[in-house]
Amino acid sequence: MISSQDGSTTEPESGERAVSDMIAFMLVFATIIVSVALLSTFGMQAMTEYQEGEQLQNAERAMVSLSDNFDDVLRHDGIEQRYGELSLREGTITTGDSGTVVTIKSTSSKIDEEVNLGEFTYQSGSDTIAYEGGGVLRSDGEGSVVLKRPSLTCREDGAAVISLIKTDSENRSIQSSGGLGVTMTETDRTRTTYDDIDTVTVEAIDSDYDDAWDDVYNSSDEWTCNADRAVITIVTVDIEY
């Protein structure tokens, strides 16, 4: 209600009131739309990041579990094959005969071996989970970490026990949204014992996972064991899926 100069009052015109109501409605509606848009954008982004994180954690656990299953082939002469499954969820599995190269040497020069560990990886986006030598490593494209160490043991009785898986498979890859069965089959096994070696070292000299191998070495330049004797087992396998 509006007062005039003579003290009388007048009601606002209906057109002005309608315009004011319309402006208020538009402001409230615009606020709701912007809020919903922001919530949808950031909410979906957060949900996507969470799902990707969960997928990679599941893939890590699956690869470590698969490697534990494959360890039977490495440890036991009588077991030549193991089977496991992976849920890919749009990820890609790749196998091949070329991967990290590892050298095994001794200060006495009795040991001088070079082993190409081959390739068995799961990749999703820029993240890669690799099964190398019997260990499991993860890379995000910038750095890498070790999830499970290869079997390198420096025993208190003065013996170095080095057991490695060498993947020698057809170069191929597959992407899938479902599960994938994976079979490891032993194709060759060598076990060599060396005496009077003084010190034995293991070093990855050509790898896409240098940071992870540094963790395997406990952040030194190479894995070292002061030992009188070394037992080196290399099991060559074919991985099929």
Image (tube, helix red, strand yellow):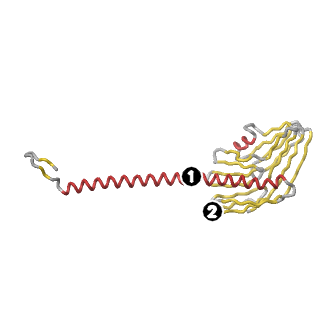
Question: At 73% from the left edge and 63% from the top edge, which residue is drawn?
Answer: 241
Q: How many marks?
A: 2
Q: Extreme left residue here? A: 6
Q: Is residue 29 left or right of residue 189?
A: left
Give the amino acid at mark 1: Tyr
Q: Is residue 38 left or right of residue 130?
A: left
Residue 12 drawn at (x, y percent): 17, 53
Please give the label number shown on residue 99. Answer: none
Give the amino acid at mark 2: Ser
Q: Is residue 36 left or right of residue 125?
A: left
Identify the element where label 1 is drawn.
helix
Q: Nearer the viewer, residue 190 or 72?
A: 72
Q: Residues within 10 Å of mark 2 (few under 14, many from 20)?
A: few
Q: Does the residue at mark 2 contact the one at mark 1 (Cβ under 8 Å)? A: no
Mark 2 or 1: the one toward you: 1
Identify the element where label 2 is drawn.
loop
Can you tell which quarter of the image residue 108 is in?
A: top right
Q: Is residue 19 left or right of residue 103?
A: left
> Disc 2 marks which residue?
177
Question: At 78% from the left edge and 42% from the top edge, which residue is drawn?
Answer: 203
Q: Nearer the viewer, residue 6 or 20?
A: 6
> Disc 1 marks which residue?
50
Q: Extreme right residue here? A: 195
Above or below residue 66? Residue 204 is above
> Which tag, 2 or 1, sits closer to the chain's start?
1
Q: Nearer the viewer, residue 37 or 108?
A: 37
Q: CA distance from mark 2 to mark 1?
A: 18 Å
Can you tell which quarter of the image residue 240 is in?
A: bottom right
Q: Nearer the viewer, residue 14 or 209?
A: 14
Can you tell which quarter of the image residue 37 is in?
A: bottom left
Q: Residues within 10 Å of mark 1 (few under 14, many from 20)?
A: few
Residue 223 drawn at (x, y percent): 79, 40
